[in-house]
């Protein structure tokens, strides 16, 4: 369950990065549709956070330690919303690039989460 | 994370977070969270294992934090301070990067700056260079458009 969510979130994050990268390439700021995309990715990260905490509560142990696992889960959850707020403040192509960078960072976090859980 | 736009008509600080500056703030923000939380966990749990590496990570986190704050704050003094810190950061990543390659035994565990920041997609070495270009450009832009 957690692994499937990790893969799904990573793929969605990369898709978001590509989409916003495309908007930046066409010199456009993020639009409503992009924010819906960010919401979807954030929901995936939230689901992952919940599932991760539930698995911890059921007594499963991440390979590289609970503290690191939880901090990465929280970081993954807050990554895209933070970038979204910054793109709201920056209504140019640079806002789009910021969200694209946020998507790439989230994908990297997912790879690390996969390792930390011991997949 | 959201930064309120400067009030229109209010004279003063050069805004450093417009356009590409926003991307820089984001990347620096990520590095702050990465370096500070990583070193906090490591210093709290296993400081004896690699005290030098963990202290360096913590120091790097502080430098990143200061640069982020300067960028968000804006203004000429903040711009200069950020420029100095970026130079220090670049020197740090080059020195520590070379050091980790030359004498790996000094670093039982890796730091943010190990191998020129390879574990962080080389962001630690690319970021200060980009930021210094951006900060230098901010001065010329202000002079040409008073």
Image (tube, rainbow, N blue to C red):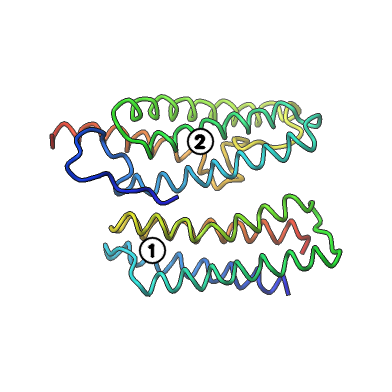
Do tag 1 and tag 2 residues touch (Cβ < 8 Å)?
no
Q: Is residue B90 above or below residue A58?
A: above
Q: Is residue B136 above or below residue B19?
A: above
Q: Residues within 10 Å of mark 2 (few under 14, many from 20)?
A: some
Q: Position of residue B134 (x, y in %)?
A: 32, 38
Viewport quadrant of the N terminus of chain A: bottom right
Q: Is residue A42 left or right of residue B25?
A: right
Q: CA distance from mark 1 to mark 2?
A: 27 Å
Q: Position of residue B98 (x, y in %)?
A: 60, 28
Q: Which mark is residue B65?
A: 2
Eye-nearest disc, 1 or 2:
2
Q: Chain of mark 2?
A: B
Residue at x-position 86% and y-position 64%? A59
Q: Position of residue B65 (x, y in %)?
A: 50, 35
Residue at x-position 74% and y-position 27%? B51
Q: Which mark is residue B20?
A: none
Residue occupied by mark 1: A21
Q: Residues within 10 Å of mark 1 (few under 14, many from 20)?
A: many
């Amino acid at each position: 369950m957690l692994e499937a969510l990790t893969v799904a979130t990573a793929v969605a994050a990369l898709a978001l990065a590509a989409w916003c990268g495309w908007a930046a390439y066409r010199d456009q700021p993020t639009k409503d549709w992009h924010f819906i995309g960010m919401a979807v990715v954030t929901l995936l990260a939230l689901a992952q956070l919940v599932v991760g905490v539930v698995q911890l509560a059921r007594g499963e142990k991440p390979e590289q330690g609970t503290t690191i696992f939880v901090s990465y889960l929280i970081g993954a959850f807050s990554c895209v919303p933070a970038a979204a707020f910054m793109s709201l403040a920056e209504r140019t192509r640079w806002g789009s690039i910021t969200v694209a960078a946020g998507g790439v960072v989230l994908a990297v976090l997912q790879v690390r989460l996969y390792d930390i859980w011991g997949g | 994370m959201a930064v309120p736009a400067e009030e229109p008509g209010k004279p003063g600080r050069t805004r450093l977070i417009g356009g590409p500056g926003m991307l820089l703030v984001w990347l620096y923000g990520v590095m702050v969270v990465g370096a500070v939380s990583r070193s906090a966990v490591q210093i709290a749990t296993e400081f004896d294992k690699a005290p030098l590496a963990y202290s360096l990570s913590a120091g790097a986190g502080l430098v990143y934090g200061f640069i982020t704050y300067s960028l968000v704050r804006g203004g000429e003094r903040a711009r200069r301070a950020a420029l100095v810190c970026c130079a220090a950061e670049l020197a740090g990543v080059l020195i520590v990067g070379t050091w980790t390659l030359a004498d790996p035994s000094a670093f039982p565990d890796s730091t943010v700056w190990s191998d020129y920041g390879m574990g962080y997609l080389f962001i630690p070495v690319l970021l200060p260079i980009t930021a210094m270009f951006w900060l230098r450009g901010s001065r010329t832009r202000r002079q040409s458009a008073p």
